[in-house]
């Protein structure tokens, strides 16, 4: 198997350029549950796995480290063959034309924001015998494709050999009834959690066969065109629903139980992250910087959600560092739990504005473990008055995460220690972290 990639594009190409001729056809794609299998030995052997959920929200559960094989079927409807019943077709025998015309090309992409949990493997493209797998080059990792394989003539530039059984089968492939299109698409499950794969139409590649001309006499063989499906009108493409892949027993995605991430760092107070706390201010004194702290245990209890406003940053304070003191089930988190939390936060780092890490050596004096600080959130986007939101109800790989304190400091970190007075750190708890 090749390395895990975050996304994969399956692009189908018919022979020649596809004309924008439409017949109001309907192309419908579905998951083929019979093709869903899982391998726990690196792809040597596969066994069936249940496709659960509902038709509109399917899901499948696999072990951590497993390879999931999925299948996709499709059908073309509302695409009658105008050559059916003409003199050529009425001659019978090998001249009999399909009543409904089928696929001329297939293309769709899969994307997921949870690639650290599970991702499409571009080395795993295997398709039905009516298509042939091809390799592609380009700048996108995981770019692969299929081409129509058994059409050897006639689509556009010549006439498909519609007088042969094989040619007629190709013309009617998927016409009126579902056929297996892809029977071995692979998804690698990397770590415990939940990854949602959303398919999208590859515009210009989904295509179908339509009648062009001919067939009006017993010797006048019909000609057909391969045309691009234009959706939502006049054609219709009913794409696959999003597929949820649950790896292991966890369901954390790094993007929250709703539509937001565990962490939010924005210039205005985010919604959905609980109450907004009193603002804290970092300082600049004689060219050095000083941190700001908010210990929740001074006033309330540990919090699973909250928004912490911070002021005092200068536009040149890059990076900006924020720290959280965490509990898991009311106890000091283990290193393994912290690594999972960090990984889940970083699954959404492209949208939440921060990169999470354990407290680095140059910040241990500012964010001491003795006061409970576990995780640093680093932002390289300057914001003089940011709002840090956290919602640990979105962290379902590690249950019961709460925060007892938030801190903030700009760089340079080496100057900070000179300005950390004992008075600002009197309250807190000492932690002995388990391995």
Image (cartoon, rainbow, N blue to C red):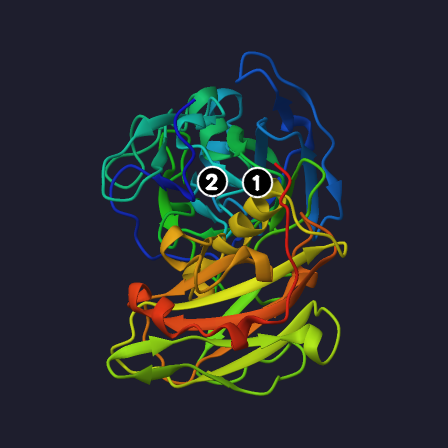
Image position of 381 with respect to 89: above or below: below
The secondary element bearing badge 2 is classed as: strand
Viewer-nearest of labels 1 and 2?
Answer: 1
From the viewer's perspective, tell me whether residue 2 is left or right of residue 399.
Answer: left
| Quarter of the N terminus within the rendering | top left
Residue 11 picture location, percent across and down = 37, 42
Task: Tell me the residue at 76%/54% (across/down).
Answer: 329
Q: Where is residue 330 in the image (x, y as percent from the top left)?
A: 76, 57
Residue marked by disc 1: 74
User: Which numbered disc flags the more N-terminal residue, 1 or 2?
Assistant: 1
* 56 to 129, vertically: above or below: below
Residue hosting label 2: 103
Relative depth, front residue between 399 and 177 = 399
Q: What element carries label 1?
A: strand
Q: Is residue 391 above or below residue 221?
A: below
User: Which quarter of the image is occupied by the C terminus?
Assistant: top right
Distance of label 1 from label 2 (alpha carbons)? 9 Å
Residue situated furthest top in the rendering: 44
Judge whether residue 391 can be spotted in this image. Answer: yes
**Residue contact between numbered discs 1 and 2, judged by CB atoms under 8 Å:** yes
Q: Which residue is drawn at the image coordinates 57% and 27% (left, top)?
A: 65
Asked whether 402 or 288 is in front, the reply is 288
The furthest residue to the front: 422
In this image, 339 relative to 267: left or right?
A: right
* Residue 61, x across and y down, in percent: 69, 36
Residue at point 41%, 52% (across, down)? 360
Which residue is more in the foreground, 424 or 218? 424
Res 236 visible: no
């Amino acid at each position: 198997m090749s390395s895990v990639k975050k996304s994969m594009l399956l692009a189908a190409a018919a022979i020649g350029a596809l004309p924008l001729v439409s017949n109001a056809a309907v192309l419908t794609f579905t998951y083929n549950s019979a093709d869903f299998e899982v391998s726990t030995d690196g792809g040597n052997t596969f066994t069936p796995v249940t496709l659960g959920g509902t038709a509109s929200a399917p899901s499948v559960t696999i072990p951590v480290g497993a390879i999931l094989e999925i299948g996709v079927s499709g059908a073309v409807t509302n695409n009658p063959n105008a050559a059916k019943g003409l003199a050529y077709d009425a001659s019978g025998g090998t001249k009999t034309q399909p009543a409904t015309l089928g696929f001329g090309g297939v293309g769709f992409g899969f994307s997921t924001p949870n690639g650290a949990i599970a991702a499409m493997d571009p080395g795993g493209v295997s398709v039905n015998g009516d298509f042939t797998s091809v390799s592609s080059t380009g700048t996108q990792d995981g770019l692969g494709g299929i081409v129509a394989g058994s059409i050897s003539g006639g689509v556009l530039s010549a006439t498909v050999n519609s007088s042969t059984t094989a040619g007629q089968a190709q013309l009617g492939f998927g016409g009126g009834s579902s056929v297996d299109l892809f029977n071995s698409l692979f998804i690698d499950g990397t770590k415990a959690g939940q990854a949602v794969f959303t398919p999208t139409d590859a515009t210009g590649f989904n295509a179908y066969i339509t009648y062009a001309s001919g067939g009006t006499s017993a010797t006048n063989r019909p000609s057909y065109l391969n045309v691009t499906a234009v959706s939502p009108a006049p054609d219709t493409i009913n794409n696959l629903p999003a597929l949820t892949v649950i790896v292991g027993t966890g369901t954390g995605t790094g993007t929250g139980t709703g539509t937001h991430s565990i962490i939010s760092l924005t210039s205005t107070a985010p919604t959905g992250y609980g109450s907004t706390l009193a603002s804290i201010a970092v300082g600049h004194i004689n060219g050095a910087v000083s941190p700001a702290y908010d210990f929740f245990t001074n006033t309330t209890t540990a919090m699973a959600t909250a928004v912490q406003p911070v002021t005092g940053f200068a536009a040149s304070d890059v990076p900006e560092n924020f720290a959280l003191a965490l509990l898991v089930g009311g106890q000091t988190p283990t290193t393994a739990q912290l690594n999972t939390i960090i990984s889940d936060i970083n699954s959404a780092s492209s949208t939440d504005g921060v990169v999470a890490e354990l407290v680095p050596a140059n910040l241990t004096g500012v964010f001491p473990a003795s006061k409970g600080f576990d995780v640093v959130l680093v932002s390289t986007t300057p914001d003089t008055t940011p709002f840090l939101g956290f919602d640990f109800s979105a962290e379902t790989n590690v249950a019961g995460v709460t925060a007892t304190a938030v801190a903030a400091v700009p760089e340079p970190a080496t100057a900070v220690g000179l300005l950390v007075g004992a008075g600002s750190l009197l309250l807190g708890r000492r932690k002995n972290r388990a391995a």
